[in-house]
Amino acid sequence: MKEDRRFPYRHDSLQFLKTKTALVIFIVLTYLFGYLTAYYNHQTLHVPPPVLKTVKETKPRGCLVDNFKVTTRCGDLVPPESIRQTVIDKIFNGTSPYVDFPPPHAGKYLRSKRIKGWGSYGAVFENLIRRVKPRTIVEVGSFLGASAIHMANLTRRLGLEETQILCVDDFRGWPGFRDRFKDMALVNGDVLLLYQFMQNVVSSGSTGSILPVPFSAGSALEKLCEWGLTADLVEIDAGHDFNSAWADINRAVRILRPGGVLFGHDYFTAADNRGVRRAVNLFAEINRLKVKTDGQHWVIDSVNVI
């Protein structure tokens, strides 16, 4: 084979790469490349922090219920003797919901009386009804009507025949409530709480003094305010978490007559100062009111904060 003369230095170069000198040069170059790369990344990561503008602090306004930003304008006051018919007109198209009750599709699922409540027979009800002699009571959170029926019985016994009790509840229960009330029917996703509530009212002979307001607390209280419907007593016993109780209290106070009384259940619970109690205490503190207790119930007298 003839010797390849086209690349006279190839053989020498290959021989040089096999030497220790070439290996040292290679290691040095590799180290230098790594050092320069690390230095560059270090410089790009350490970007000077942005200059923050100073925000001028503003003092909170003396706000009373404005801290919740309830802006609904309440309508002209409806006299107590017209409240029942106003509710029937506004919600039930002028006809009492007890007319032709129960509807055919629900009647067979209802028990003649299925009353269940928590703290529904506490002394606070008679204490307040005796003292205030209310013409109108609004209950926020009624479930099956135990406390509402108890109040209706008390007003009759005390000679307050004209007292009306408006029961605000969406009558849907809560997720998982049928685990505790397995006997309650479920018809196409409807737990029939409203109908069982009404059946309980019928069985107790209280259809003339108790009306359901079957909507969420927020929307119902807002509409009662817009319609000019007010109450002498407002009971808050719906959601027991802080946010629900706080919202209900701040909306309910707007439908309370001057000098009226707010009260509610579950002031002493396992939630301690994280639920109802925290909401009640904060509301009282902001509005410079005093919280009293009556058993498991909280009471705030003479509320004039609107």
Image (spheres, helix red, strand yellow):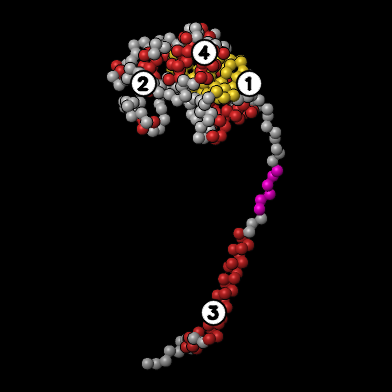
Side of 277 where 3 appears, left or right? left
Residue 71 seen from this side: no
- Which residue position holds label 1? 305
Label 1 – label 4 distance at C-alpha: 19 Å
Report the mark closest to the observer, 1 or 4: 4
Quarter holding the N terminus is bottom left
Amino acid at pointer 1: Val
Residue of label 2: 114
Would you say the magenta stretch is mainly helix, strand or loop? Answer: loop
Q: Quadrant of the C terminus?
A: top right
Q: Residues within 10 Å of mark 1 (few under 14, many from 20)?
A: some
Q: Earlier in the sequence, mark 1 or mark 2?
A: 2
Query: Dot 1 lies on which element?
Result: loop
- For residue 64: magenta? no
Between the residue at mark 2 and the residue at mark 3, the CA separation in whole angstroms equals 90 Å
The local secondary structure at tag 2 comes to loop
Dot 4 corresponds to which residue? 136
Label 1 and label 3: CA atoms lie apart by 84 Å
Q: Dot 3 corresponds to which residue?
A: 26
- What mark, if any, has residue 180 been given in the picture? none
Q: Are marks 1 and 4 in contact (CB under 8 Å)?
A: no
Image-based side of 254 in relation to 58, left or right: left
Q: Is residue 301 visible?
A: yes
Tell me the magenta residue range.
49-54
Q: Marks 1 and 2: which is nearer the front?
A: 2
